[in-house]
């Protein structure tokens, strides 16, 4: 089922853990997700990358959130890292059936690629076509090989209607800016200089807020969760936009 658009910027974190240092900002009652969704508008489900979840689990998550809450779900590593997008039709169909438990709250399919995966245009085109066939929302790709940051790759993503995530820190020139299909801008901020750990400074967040004010259709996901900085940064950015 296709998700309805919600006005952005939409800000959230990878997962919905509430660290002690930000707990006072959230209601004391309810599950972690219920408390998180009281203030945040989206969350990125990363556990789906490592293991499958039953449709009932996704249904429970959907039922725990307000009507306008949305999820991004990360593609399983079996598909992106082991099959490397090739010959994964059955796995993709099973995953879509499982995550389909979110109903219209499943807004984004995130496909993060391994750093070693070079662009193979024929494989990529076929995979994205199949992904669109089983999922009615937006597809976002986070490539991590230089071959995906070329005019050829950009044309392929645009034609395939796949947005390229903007990331920090950026390993390749242009990786810090959104690319591909322009229907959604999707930012993934992993923490810098120490990936997954570093908190973002106020000046950096203020600069991002200025960039986002005119960008109605965008998601901003903080993935610097190892130190508990992600949710604090998300709340700070939410106050600025």
Image: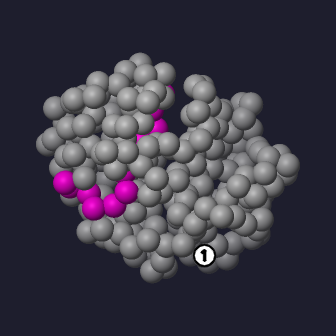
Here the colouring is: one colour
Instruction: Work out whether 74 lies above or below 238.
Output: above
> In the rendering, at what x and y percent does residue 10 appear?
58, 64
Q: Nearer the viewer, residue 137 or 183?
A: 183
Residues rendered magenta in the picture: 133-145
Instruction: Work out whether 5 lies above or below 224.
Output: below
- The residue sitting at the right extreme is 203
Question: Please, what secondary structure does the residue beneath circle 1 have?
Answer: loop
Q: Residue at x 35, y 25 (%)?
A: 119
> In the rendering, at what x and y percent does residue 193 appear?
74, 31
Instruction: Work out whether 164 lies above or below 101.
Output: above
Q: Which residue is mark 1?
A: 38
Residue 197 visible? The answer is: no
Instruction: Work out whether 43 lies above or below 170.
Output: below
- Determine crowd level at label 1: few under 14, some 14-19, many 20+ residues with C-alpha closer than 10 A: some
Where, by quadrant of the figure, is residue 16 drawn? bottom right
Q: Residue at x 44, y 30 (%)?
A: 151
Is the C terminus in the top left, top right, bottom left or bottom right quadrant? Answer: bottom right
> In the rendering, at what x and y percent does residue 25 appear?
75, 70
Q: Residue at x 22, y 46 (%)?
A: 129
Residue 149 visible? The answer is: yes
Magenta-colored stretch includes residue 113:
no
Q: Nearer the viewer, residue 98 or 200?
A: 200
């Amino acid at each position: 089922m296709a998700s309805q658009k919600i006005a952005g910027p939409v800000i959230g974190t990878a997962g919905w853990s509430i660290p002690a240092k930000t707990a006072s900002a959230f209601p004391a009652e309810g599950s972690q997700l219920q408390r998180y969704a009281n203030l945040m508008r989206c969350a990125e489900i990363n556990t789906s990358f490592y293991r499958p979840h039953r449709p009932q689990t996704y249904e429970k998550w959907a039922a725990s959130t307000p009507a306008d809450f949305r999820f991004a779900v990360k593609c399983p590593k079996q598909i992106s890292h082991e099959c490397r997008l090739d010959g994964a039709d059955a796995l993709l169909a099973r995953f879509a059936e499982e995550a389909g438990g979110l109903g219209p709250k499943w807004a984004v399919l995130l496909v993060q690629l391994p750093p070693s995966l070079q662009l193979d245009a024929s494989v990529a085109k076929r995979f994205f076509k199949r992904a669109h066939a089983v999922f009615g929302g937006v597809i976002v790709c986070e490539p991590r090989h230089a071959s995906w940051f070329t005019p050829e790759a950009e044309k392929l993503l645009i034609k395939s209607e796949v947005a390229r995530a903007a990331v920090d820190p950026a390993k390749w020139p242009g990786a810090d800016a959104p690319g591909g299909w322009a229907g959604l801008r999707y930012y993934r901020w992993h923490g810098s200089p120490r990936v997954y750990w570093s908190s973002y400074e106020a000046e950096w967040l203020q600069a991002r807020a200025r960039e986002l004010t005119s960008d109605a259709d965008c998601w901003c996901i903080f993935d610097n969760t190892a130190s508990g900085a992600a949710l604090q940064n998300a709340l700070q950015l939410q106050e600025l936009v």
